[in-house]
Amino acid sequence: MIPVTVAKLGLDSASNTYVVLLQERDGERVLPIWIGRPEAESIALQMNGVKRERPMTHDLCRSLINGLGATLRRVQVTRVQDATFYAELHLARGGSPVIVDARPSDAIAIALRLDAPIYVNEALLGGDLEEGLAEHAGRDDESLSAEQLQRYLEQMRPEDFGKFSF
């Protein structure tokens, strides 16, 4: 697993979908993960230090984790299958590890609230993504091979995305 940071949050104009870019902490590799608007807003609020009057869903998750006496040790983005990314929350409670399946967007929003590190499976950073992600590159699945998608993602930079605003 490779440590990453949230490099940028923006709107992918090719697919009109929000995307969070995870960048290798001490490197150049970037992993784009397309996410929903509510999760993008939640991540943006936390990144910009905006406090809401009432807790949002990810704030509630933070409160539940803390209230149960657990600690979020790390978040891991583990794999992509059929164009769906998978992540895990690695918690510790009373010395016992607890692993919770999560969507990466939710896991990232919670990790930011709890100052937990985020890790990505190296195979994902290496560009070993499935053909199913072609739809997120703004093209039909049939018109983009796995190799073409890999080249497309390798050429992406955080600067390719606009700044997220809400």
Image: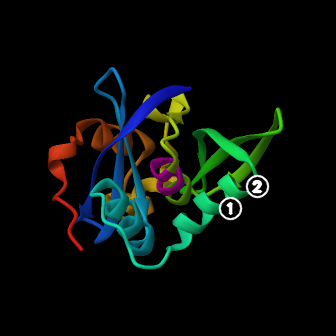
Of 76 and 90, which appears nearest the observer?
A: 90
Q: Position of residue 88 (x, y in %)?
A: 66, 46
Q: Which quarter shows the C terminus?
A: bottom left
Q: Give the number of marks.
A: 2
Is residue 25 in view?
yes
Q: Position of residue 56 (x, y in %)?
A: 50, 74
Q: On the picture, is 59 further left or further right than 127?
A: right
Q: Is residue 122 magenta?
A: no
Q: Is residue 110 magenta?
A: yes
Is residue 139 in view?
no
Indicate the colouring scheme.
Answer: rainbow
Dot 2 corresponds to which residue?
A: 68
Does 116 sit above or below residue 64? Answer: above
Q: Position of residue 44 (x, y in %)?
A: 32, 61
Q: Which quarter shows the N terminus?
A: top right
Q: Quadrant of residue 45?
A: bottom left
The answer to the question of whether label 1 and label 2 lie on touching residues, with beta carbons closer than 8 A, is yes
Identify which amino acid the numbered label 2 is placed on. Leu
Does 101 sit above or below residue 29? Answer: below
Q: Which mark is residue 64?
A: 1
Of 143 and 74, which appears nearest the observer?
A: 74
Of 85 and 74, which appears nearest the observer?
A: 74
Residue reaching furthest top?
A: 26
Q: Position of residue 150 (x, y in %)?
A: 37, 39
Q: Give the Cα distance between marks 1 and 2.
A: 6 Å
Q: Main secondary structure of the magenta part?
A: helix
Q: Secondary structure at mark 1?
A: helix
Q: Secondary structure at mark 2?
A: loop
Give, as a single range, the part of the protein colored magenta: 108-113
Of 19 and 129, which appears nearest the observer?
A: 19
Does 5 sit above or below residue 53? Answer: above
Identify which amino acid the numbered label 1 is placed on. Leu
